[in-house]
Image: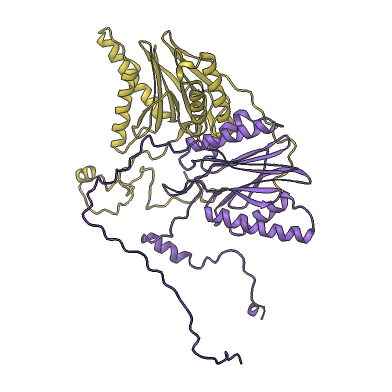
Chain colours: A purple, B yellow
Amino acid sequence: MTSRLPQAKGGFNFDNHVRNTLMEGKGLGIPKATKTGTTIVGLIYKDGLVLGADTRATAGPIVADKNCEKIHYLAPNMYCCGAGTAADTEMTTALISSQLELHRLSTGRQARVVTAMTMLKQMLFKYQGQIGAALILGGVDINGPHLYTIYPHGSTDKLPYVTMGSGSLAAMSVFESRYVANMEREDAIALVQDAIEAGIFNDLGSGSNVDVVVINSEKVEVLRNYARPNERGVKEASYKYAQGTTRVLKSSIRDFVDIKETVHVTTTEEMDIS
Amino acid sequence: MDHFPTNWGNPRSEEVDSYNTYPVASHIGNVPHSVRQIAGYGHTNGHPTSHTQSPVVTGTSVLGLKYKGGVMMAADNLASYGSLARFRDIERLHKVTDFTVLGASGDMSDFQYVKHLLDSQMIKEYNADDGHTLATHNIYEYLWRVMYNRRSKMNPLWNTFVLGGVNKGESFLGAIDLKGTPYQSASIATGFGSHLAQPILRKELEQRGGENNITEEQAVEILKKSMKVLWYRDARSMNKFQLAKITSEGVTISESMSVETEWGFAENIRGYGA
């Protein structure tokens, strides 16, 4: 008798799996998602933490967005960098941001970073890695600065310096060479910038500009396009053709017609509103 | 190799003999032996002829850097057997002539074979006794042709070689991979090194304005920094490596050395989340 009651179902419905595999075998696969093919980093310094990201979004070998934003707002004291499938990182962070705000209103307190981390990891685990979001979560709360990495399958790490994305090895090589505990703000930002630039120049999935977010107990600074090492060069001359290069044989000019609408009341009957 | 312990100890299947040691019935009918040989099928194990598709005993990254006065190379002393750190005193930097060093990553048995080939070439050179010795770029050309030839026969030598040397005051540094792709540059890194060390090497060259602004001491420092990052982040590396220095004076392959490492970076962190 209990089988008649609606059972709570979580996660995805895998009923179509067999059919999908069959179709893929015949060449009718699912469209490729836009991936961020990214370099994202996070670093704890003396007064708080610094998050960094590149700004290139790729769809296979094509650059889909030359200047996208990979550092997402979660709460006034927390930001999250996202690597992996762009839609997944965007929607997951937006969802948890919304949940956090409701939580904040309910508790009347500043949200803690572990709360966001737990919400994210429980959701990602529930979807068994099908949501391709690899995140670097950083924030400052009542217990100080916290930096976490969250993987698509739901595992987390808590570390003083982290990198994720296709350019993570290039960025990590910079961190491993120069990271020390309790850095000053300027040094921390410079190190984050160098790490992201290593990703931008040595990884094909990363490129364009460097975004930085600095979070400490007092304020948050969102430094969008902190560095722009790939600005397009200025054209040296004007390559426009002079008027008259192509001979004009005939001109025909028609003005756009102004259409005026006037309403003529034809009856004095009142509107029937019964 | 079957990685699943539950499959070990089961009786051998009579249809498939993957080691080709026992005549089992082939699915091909009565075909004369001569035809089988030429056609390349009908072997006792029922599979067509195939060659090495994956390496067995392997060496990880080899690094190379040009500096003012010569070329420096680095490689650790480890030959891994999958995830086992099996041979911990292997010299992956090999002196070919008085002015050329060959570094090898990838399959160690193929490296030993190539060392044998080069020995034969050097003996031929010695016998010719014409006053000429093979310069680095000559050995490079020879090695490139060998690699490309094997790749074209679908039976590659599973290595990425790094060749460094000096000839008449000119420095030479290049790499050749298992497909026969030659690549020359002021900085070379194979395997994991291409992701972790190459960004560091390139940044150093860029910052100092080229190889002629790097002294010997600086080159040692840069390579040691790179080997340290590799020890941290390459799971198939070892903290025991050699440096090879080639100048117009000759070749010096150093004794094995290690780098200082710091493992207390997360002392104050507990757990991985809440």
Query: Measured along the vertical axis of the image, is residue B226 above or below residue A251?
Result: above
- Residue at image coords 64%, 26%: B261
* Residue A16, position as x, y percentages in the image: 48, 67
Q: Is residue B66 visible?
A: no
Choose between B1 and B21: the one closer to the eye.
Answer: B1
Q: Is residue B157 visible?
A: yes
Query: Measured along the vertical axis of the image, is residue B71 above or below residue A218?
Result: above
- Residue at image coords 62%, 59%: A126
- Residue at image coords 62%, 52%: A154
* Residue A19, position as x, y percentages in the image: 44, 66
- Residue at image coords 38%, 22%: B115
* Residue B195, position as x, y percentages in the image: 49, 34
Query: Measured along the vertical axis of the image, is residue B253 above or below residue A41?
Result: above
> Is B212 on the left-hand or right-hand side of A211?
left
Q: How many marks?
A: 0
* Residue A47, position as x, y percentages in the image: 73, 37
Query: Measured along the vertical axis of the image, is residue B5 above or below residue B161?
Result: below
> Is A92 on the left-hand or right-hand side of B82?
right
